[in-house]
Amino acid sequence: MAYQKVPREVEEEGGQPNEKATLIAQPPASEDEVHRGGLMSNTTFLRMTILISVTMQNTAYALLRRYSRGHLQERYSTSSALLVMEVVKILLSAQQIAFGGHQSDVPSGTFVSKFSFLIAHSWKMIVPAVTYLVMNILGFMALQHLDASTFSIIAQMKVFTTAVFSVLILGRSLHMRKWRALTTLVLGVILISNEAMPKMAHRRLGQLDSKTSEQMRSFAIGMAASFGDVLLSGFVSIYFEMVLKSKTETFSVWDRNLQLAFWSMLIYAPIMLYDRPNDPFGGWSVITLLCAACGALGGVLVALSIKYTDSIMKTIATTGSIVLTTVLNAAFLQGPFTLPILTGTIVVVISVFNYSDPGDHE
């Protein structure tokens, strides 16, 4: 039996209260309480693991693609790398479907019967499969022309585009607090984009030398690819949310991931063969393999974060990745790290946090 000291007031001779301690028997914690405490501890550990993994994956994926395309100038087929990512995703999703026991409309039976059922009901995933194809190509193109930190910070504009599409497609209304956060986010991105622009860009076009003109052209291509990626990201995020939360059918995140990977593979394979009919995996290196593995891991982490984490934890992971990418890009890839870049990064980080703030005490 456990005992706990509890204050008790007694009167002294002068009639004044005097606080003393008495021992009161406390029942031991039940097995259910101990079990629940253990589950909470395990869940917290899992969430923190996912949080750290998402931060590291986002950082590594941006830096690896920048190093591969921008510094090493590797010219492997982008579709071949994307195909390998989808093969890994479909294998991991299949394993979860076969042994995970997730709530779903998929009837019980053999894995082949489950797979056939999922493919027969997967037509909705054609849209995100095509969208992700274009996004991934734009991402590789952007990182060929922009440094990793600028790309990562511009990518946070997906918060803005997702909010806009949620209003246009889902008919949601956003509090003025969120619009203010989105406005400062855009201003932070503009500040960083202006600082990342090649020097001497303020001169008239006719006065630019050939080297500066080439730098400006490369910068413009990178920015256009980045903003195209951001725009499509906002759309596909809302579309995927609509599909996952459909009231007419119930499929788990792993079900939808398998369907998405299936259609993505059907799209990527012919493009890869068209790009390099005789040597589909020509130009691959260890860095290319790491890019593909990191990209595949990202798809798995997205599924896990949807299931186990909340918006605040995702925001922490996102902002942590921004800071880490900026620092590592400056340290190892000769990326910019000036006062305007630092200021813009802080503005973007604060804006993302402000947008995710529920404002319960407003």
Image (cartoon, rainbow, N blue to C red):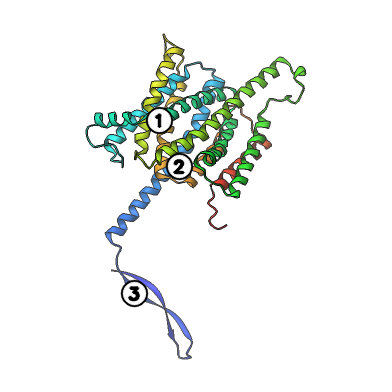
**Residue 344 in view in this figure:** no
**Residue found at the far top of this picture:** 278
Q: Is residue 54 left or right of residue 149?
A: left
Q: Quadrant of residue 51?
A: top left
Q: Give the class, few, some or many, for how many residues have Cα within 10 Å of label 1's Cα (few <14, many ≥20).
A: many
Task: Identify which residue is drawn at 68% across, 25% down.
Answer: 198
The mark nearer the N terminus, 3 or 1, is 3
Q: Give the class, few, some or many, for how many residues have Cα within 10 Å of label 2's Cα (few <14, many ≥20).
A: many
Residue 127, how many percent across, how many down? 44, 29
90 is higher (above) or lower (below) than 78: below
319 is higher (above) or lower (below) than 216: below
292 is higher (above) or lower (below) than 42: above
Q: Nearer the viewer, residue 205 or 173?
A: 173
Q: Secondary structure at mark 1?
A: helix
Q: Secondary structure at mark 2?
A: helix
Numbered circle sitting on residue 24:
3
32 is higher (above) or lower (below) than 65: below
**Residue found at the far left of this picture:** 109
Task: Identify which residue is drawn at 40% across, 34% down.
Answer: 300
The mark nearer the N terminus, 3 or 2, is 3
Residue 122, how many percent across, how many down? 36, 30
Q: Is residue 179 left or right of residue 166?
A: right
Please give the residue where the numbered disc 1 appears in the rendered image.
125
Q: Secondary structure at mark 3?
A: strand
The mark nearer the N terminus, 1 or 2, is 2
Residue 276, how many percent across, how many down? 44, 11
Q: Give the class, few, some or many, for how many residues have Cα within 10 Å of label 3's Cα (few <14, many ≥20).
A: few
Name the amino acid, label 3: Ile
Q: Is residue 325 left or right of residue 341?
A: left
Please give the residue where the numbered disc 2 appears in the rendered image.
51
Name the amino acid, label 2: Leu
